[in-house]
Image (cartoon, grey):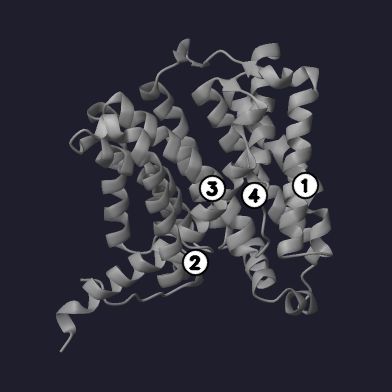
Amino acid sequence: MRIGTLKESYVADAALFDSRTQHAWLAIAAALLLLFPFAASDYWLYMACLVAINVASSTGLNILTGYTGLVSLGQAAFMGLGAYTVAILQTRLGTPFLLNLLAGGVVAMLGGIVVGIPSLRVKGLYLAIATIAASFIAHFLFANFQITGGTAGISMPPARLLGMDLDTSFRLYWLIVPVTLLMLLGAANLFRTRIGRAFIAIRDRDISAEVLGIPLLRYKLLSFGLSSFYAGIAGGLWAYFFRVVTPESFPLSMSIFFLAAIIVGGMGSILGGILGAVFMTMVPELLKLIVDLLPGGAALAVFLSPVRLIVFGALIIGFLVFEPLGLAEIWRRVRRFFHLWPFRN
């Protein structure tokens, strides 16, 4: 049983995975992810891809809101920028899908930097309102520009890899999940660097951070840019997954969804972004399955749909009231309990 760690160098202290136990769990998780698509049905593969996309976007928002302390309700707009960039490049130029995803992330990052300019002067509710304004502007541009297809949007062909169309959930799984894992690894490493520590200092007390020599505008814009880059990549994956991009694909409610995900999962935690995205995506589906399993559930589905929404909302409120630190903190408590349990009196 692991009860402590001995670090003999700075490199060992800064290691992302510093024990054999962590390596073992990572190997088990990797094996499960590799075996899952061969054992799962099309429905669960579809849900796994959707969860992975939401995890990628939630992680980006967590960089901005959870780690830097800047509230944003524009994540869906940045996803839309990435999705439209990918769709335009795919349909008009036919460029490789990896290049399209990277371009979608860069375009969204530039949009995030522009939106983040007011963050030096305003924060909190005022900054949230500014990002909502950006969402409405993005929706207007998506719906009224010819290059975006107007209100009809853009239908796009599937991504191709080695001459094979990625047109099923099974094939897309091997694109979406690895990209999401790389993004998670990048976010985890970010907060071991000077940039990540500057983000945390700004979140804890921006005035003190400025006194310490951290240029607030530069790092706030960098945080907005990184968060939007993640959203753009997630939006590009979303475009390849659904293959139809319209202005209605990225409403304000989607931004609220991601904000709720990091609150429920735990802000300022990579694990929190993962758990929150899984919770927000899967719980409505599980509630729907429970309703369908009830006697006469299929016939009562229309009448029980509002009940499902009420139960789902009550669960979110319950986390805010009883565990404001989110699912990540619950997981930490469980780990501490089972680590200490054999030694308790």
Q: Which residue is mark 3?
A: 257
Name the kind of residue labelled 4 in the image: Ser
Between marks 2 and 1, how big is the CA–CA gap? 40 Å
Name the kind of residue labelled 2 in the image: Ala
Camera sees residue 321: yes
Q: Which residue is mark 4?
A: 227
Q: Please tell me which of labels 3 and 4 falls first in the chain.
A: 4
Q: Nearer the viewer, mark 2 or mark 3?
A: 3
Q: Please tell me which of labels 2 and 1 falls first in the chain.
A: 2
Q: Residue 137: where, in percent of width, then height?
A: 79, 38
Name the kind of residue labelled 1 in the image: Ala
Between marks 2 and 3, how big is the CA–CA gap? 33 Å
Q: Residue at x 43, y 25 (%)?
A: 172
Q: Are marks 2 and 1 in contact (CB under 8 Å)?
A: no
Q: Residue 110: where, in percent of width, then height?
A: 77, 41
Q: Which residue is mark 1?
A: 133
Q: Is residue 28 above or below residue 65?
A: above
Q: Residue at x 65, y 13 (%)?
A: 91
Q: Are marks 1 and 4 in contact (CB under 8 Å)?
A: no
